[in-house]
Image (cartoon, helix red, strand yellow):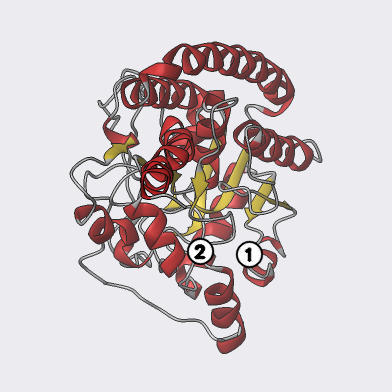
Amino acid sequence: MPISALRRALLALPLLALPYGAQAAENPSVVVSIKPIHGIASAIMAGVGKPALLLDGASSPHAYSLRPSEARSLQEADLVIYVSHGLEGFLKKPLATLSGSAHQLELADIEGLTILAMREGGAWEAHSHDHGGHDHDDHDHEDEHHDEHDHDAHDHDGHEDHAHAEEHDHDHDHDHEHEHEGEEGHHHDEHGIDSHLWLDPANGAAIAKAIANELGEIDPDHAGTYQDNLKKFLASLDALGNDLDSQLAPVRGKPFVVFHDAYQYLEAGFGLNAVGSITVSPEQKPGAKRLHEIEDKIRDSNAVCVFAEPQFRPAIVEAVVADTGAHIGTLDPLGADIPAGPDAYQNILRQNVGALVDCLSQS
């Protein structure tokens, strides 16, 4: 081949590679921490790209360890979306090492959210939720002698690791009660908030707006698509909220107890009547004193249902309700069994509302 022809061929090689590099750069690389938020991001990105999901519904945001491939996806991300450093503690160090060009969206800090303070667990007194933003009602918290566990070991994540939970269940006899009375130093989210904020559909709408706006800044070529998708998502969420509200209307005032306090945004969003939680931290088995207090609360409040969580064997819940006449249901804030994708957020809300209606309707 003549030298001039060879030179032309070599010079053409970078040009041949450009379309592929340009195509890759057109769609932003987005990484999302948990499935409910990933569902919202997926809906906003429809037609442009698909965000990566770090944790499926069966994993704990607190105890999670990144795999090498996930660490690489974070390093290559244009945008990382997560709830808070208090919820997804495993992300704190990786996020600190991201390149300066990577955007981070911490949802607990966005505008338009209803933010609620974390309750102490145990039996709750009657209270109301303030929808005015960051102002909180003073809850009548339980005395310090309750079985309070270190929130750094759970950090309000709404879900514990399946393997860890099963190991705990198998390693501890259900008849052996562990008392943790008088413990000090339990910690809340770093901002003192309940991080399960996605369970209020109004917060879901605020999250969707924040994601659409952030993507529009990163990827202005598709800003119109993101806003169009946002309008569709908000319309769908509004219709869903009305439907769920109608479903809950017949059982709205009925009292119930949850396994741990992960659902007060759902309660606030739909005016539900939760009266207590069995444990603050699902990885710790409540002691006999706590169980007796919850049994008394179930009887005194005429609680219709006690809700377990799917990754924990129901022995503790069964023990609590055995002599009370209450029914057992299951709630799941992260949607362990729900497929990830653009419908996941709505389906997680549907699943939990369906579980509430099914159980509370049995009285």
Q: Position of residue 242 (x, y in %)?
A: 65, 14
The quarter of the picture where residue 135 lies is: top left
Q: Are marks 1 and 2 in contact (CB under 8 Å)?
A: yes
- Give whichever of 280, 93 is nearer the camera: 93
Can you identify the residue that label 1 sits on? 311
User: Which residue corresponds to the image point at 42% horizontal and 49% vertical from the top-left?
Assistant: 2
The quarter of the picture where residue 250 lies is: top right
The quarter of the picture where residue 220 lies is: top left
Quarter holding the C terminus? top right
User: What is the CA distance from the residue labelled 1 to the residue labelled 2?
Assistant: 8 Å
- Looking at the image, residue 38 sits to the left or right of residue 183; the answer is right
Q: Could you tell me which secondary element the residue under label 2 belongs to?
A: loop
Task: Give the number of callouts.
Answer: 2
Kindly identify which numbered label has been placed on residue 131. Answer: none
- Give whichever of 356, 253 is nearer the camera: 356
Can you identify the residue that label 2 sits on? 160
Q: Position of residue 106 (x, y in %)?
A: 30, 38
Q: Position of residue 194 (x, y in %)?
A: 36, 43
